[in-house]
Amino acid sequence: MTPQTDLSRLRRIGFLTLPNHSMIACANALEALRMANYVAQSELYTWHVVTPDGTPAVASNGLSVSPTLPIAEAGPLDLVLVCGGIDVRHAVAPGLEDMLRRLTRRGTALGALCTGSFVLADAGLLDFYRCAIHWENLSAIREEFPHIDFVEEAYVVDRDRLTCTGGVAPLEMMLELIEASGGKSLAERVSEQFILDRGRTATPRQSARLVARPRPILPDPTLARAVKMMQAAIEQPQGVAAIARRLDVSPRQLERLFRKHLDASPSSYHLGLRLERARELLRLSPLSITDVGLACGFQSAAHFSSAYARRFGRSPRAERSRVAGKNIDQQSPLVR
């Protein structure tokens, strides 16, 4: 197993920006380094914004960063952060994943901001690592890469891989690097400059309300346990009788709880959970429609298609086509 990386040695950092990357994620990480240098009154960190060929990547907000260098001209880098965003699958240039593999062979640590984790995962560079990614992508990417331990933390440092979600999570992750290099006092002074309260755990979790959707407020503990069991059994759904038996209640009592608090039967509620997961996979994963159905507990393609159409008003195939059409629109040069 690769030993835990000494974060204090990660001083020369490359921000590998992909088309449609999240600028807020990239800027938060980069600005943390700039502020560390400012507060310490010393050049603790150097950084470059890079792309494979030096052409600035246009972010999802229509802006790009200059100067941008070809990664080959950035000099030795201790850490390369892949900056992802919208439609990351179409943002990977030919040869990019091979380049990342070469970097690891040279001892370069790798990381990812926002959906940049997908690029590392697809290159086989996160197998058997813990990895953070935005809550919206969790269900789909877990199905696609079973050898990666996707977690609900806002960021993760696992050996020589540093991954985080979007928003302010990159800033929090970089504060951990800053603390390793300059001590807790420096990290706190940087936090104060950004008016950021670090009075939390070292690896804050993404909001549970978002990570495990749908999760309504459930006043009854037995009902809450039943819903949690259903969420954990998407691929192999259990019957109402089996769930009731595990909860030590009668099927009729469980039925009453669902009717009273959720206005649905247990079976229809569980079906809804499975169909919501199917929609996520159709929108965010490359799994075939058949595999999506199987991953959500449908043994029959016809049953999956008809149930999906009843709930969402379109077939799984139409859903996938609709998403493909949106992806084409997002690649338009127009600012959206």
Image: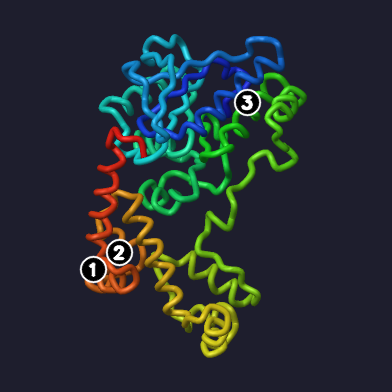
Question: Identity of the amino acid at label 2?
Answer: Gly
Asked where in the image residue 292 lies, by quadrant, the reply is bottom left
Element type at mark 3: helix
Q: Residue farthest to the bottom?
A: 252
Against 125, residue 65 (above or below) is above
Against 263, residue 162 (above or below) is above
Residue at the spot 65% in from the left edge and 29% down from the top edge: 175
Place of residue 150 in the rendered image (x, y in percent of width and height, measured from the top left): 49, 46
Quarter occupied by the C terminus: top left
- The residue that mark 3 highlights is 177
Asked where in the image residue 169 lies, by quadrant, the reply is top right
Numbered circle sitting on residue 301? 1
- The residue that mark 2 highlights is 293
Label 1 neighbour load within 10 Å: few <14, some 14-19, many 20+ = some
Question: Identity of the amino acid at label 3?
Answer: Leu
Separation of marks 3 and 2 at Cα, in angstroms: 42 Å
N-term mark: 1 or 3: 3
N-term mark: 1 or 2: 2
Tell me whether the residue at label 1 lies in contact with that at label 2, contact meaning CB atoms closer than 8 angstroms. Answer: yes
Looking at the image, residue 62 sits to the left or right of residue 210; the answer is left
Residue at the spot 67% in from the left edge and 15% down from the top edge: 38
Separation of marks 1 and 3 at Cα, in angstroms: 49 Å
Q: Mark yes or no: residue 1 visible.
A: no
